[in-house]
Image (cartoon, rainbow, N blue to C red):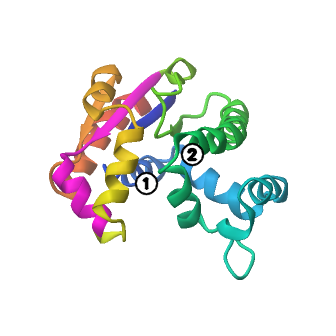
């Protein structure tokens, strides 16, 4: 079974990924792959430097993700360019991992699953949803401003549309235990079959 997991920013996708991992599933997170690529891929870093100069690197020479975010979420041309660099690399990584896994159960978290029309790559799609006021509270606690949250929210498909497109919905409007129970209700019958 191959599951594609999506949802809005701050909705709890990473927490749900953790529950799948605890249940023995192989899991991959697109955002984690992006962080790895930005940190380790010197060819990608060279393209970033050629496009934006030293403005997107910190004093130690590491990629400054906040500086990149400030650039791309204000200018869709720059975001489109960044996505054209990252998305093929990220897709290659998770596609290879799915191939290597064979019949083992896998979950891949992809925030832009439906936006990039990747749902056909999976046996089942799952959307994690959460009310906007809770999203904002969580994201502010992680150091984001309301403006930064709104910029990211605008770039994604409306959460209501994602929930309609998904095969399964997990609501993260309650406690952590509630979220885990819903996730386990999804995992257990799949794992038994």
- The residue nearer to you, when weighing 138 against 170, is 138
The x and y percentages for residue 121 are 57, 22
Q: In this view, does 134 lie above or below 64?
A: above
Residue 29 visible from this viewpoint: no
The x and y percentages for residue 104 are 60, 34
Left or right of 175 in this view: 109: right
The CA distance from mark 2 to mark 1 is 14 Å
Asked if the stretch drawn in magenta spans residue 150, the answer is no
Left or right of 122 in this view: 192: left
Residue 36 visible from this viewpoint: yes
Q: In which quarter of the image is residue 130?
A: top left
- The residue nearer to you, when weighing 138 against 100, is 138
Q: Is residue 29 above or below residue 168?
A: below
Determine whether the residue tagged by mark 1 lies in a helix, strand or loop: helix
Left or right of 138 in this view: 104: right
* Picture residue at 67% right of the left edge, 76% below the top: 58
Q: Quadrant of residue 64?
A: bottom right
Of callouts 2 and 1, which one flags the residue occurring earlier in the amino acid sequence? Answer: 1
* Picture residue at 63% right of the left edge, 51% below the top: 33
Asked if the stretch drawn in magenta spans residue 128, the answer is yes
Residue position for label 2: 30
The label on residue 178 is: none
Q: Give the range drawn in magenta.
A: 124-140
Q: How many labels does the image show?
A: 2
- The residue nearer to you, when weighing 90 against 85, is 85
Camera-side mark, 2 or 1: 2
Q: In which quadrant of the rendered image does the C terminus lie?
A: top left
Determine whether the residue tagged by mark 2 lies in a helix, strand or loop: helix
Residue position for label 1: 18
The x and y percentages for residue 61 are 75, 75
* Picture residue at 37% right of the left edge, 31% below the top: 157
């Amino acid at each position: 079974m191959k599951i594609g997991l999506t949802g809005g920013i701050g909705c709890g996708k990473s927490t749900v990924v953790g529950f799948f991992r605890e249940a023995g599933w192989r899991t991959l997170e697109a955002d984690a792959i992006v962080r790895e690529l930005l940190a380790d891929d010197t060819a990608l870093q060279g393209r970033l430097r050629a496009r934006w100069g030293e403005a997107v690197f910190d004093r130690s020479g590491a990629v400054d993700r906040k500086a990149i975010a400030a650039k791309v979420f204000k200018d869709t041309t720059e975001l489109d360019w960044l996505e054209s660099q990252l998305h093929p690399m990220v897709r290659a990584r998770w596609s290879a991992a799915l191939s290597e896994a064979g019949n083992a159960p896998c979950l891949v978290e992809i925030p832009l699953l439906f936006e990039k029309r990747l749902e056909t790559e999976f046996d089942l799609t799952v959307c994690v949803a959460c009310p906007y006021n809770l999203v904002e509270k969580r994201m502010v606690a992680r150091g984001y401003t309301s403006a930064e949250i709104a910029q990211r929210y605008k770039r994604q498909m409306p959460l209501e549309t994602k929930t309609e497109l998904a095969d399964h919905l997990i609501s993260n409007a309650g406690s952590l235990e509630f979220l885990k129970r819903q996730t386990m209700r999804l995992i257990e019958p799949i794992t038994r079959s």
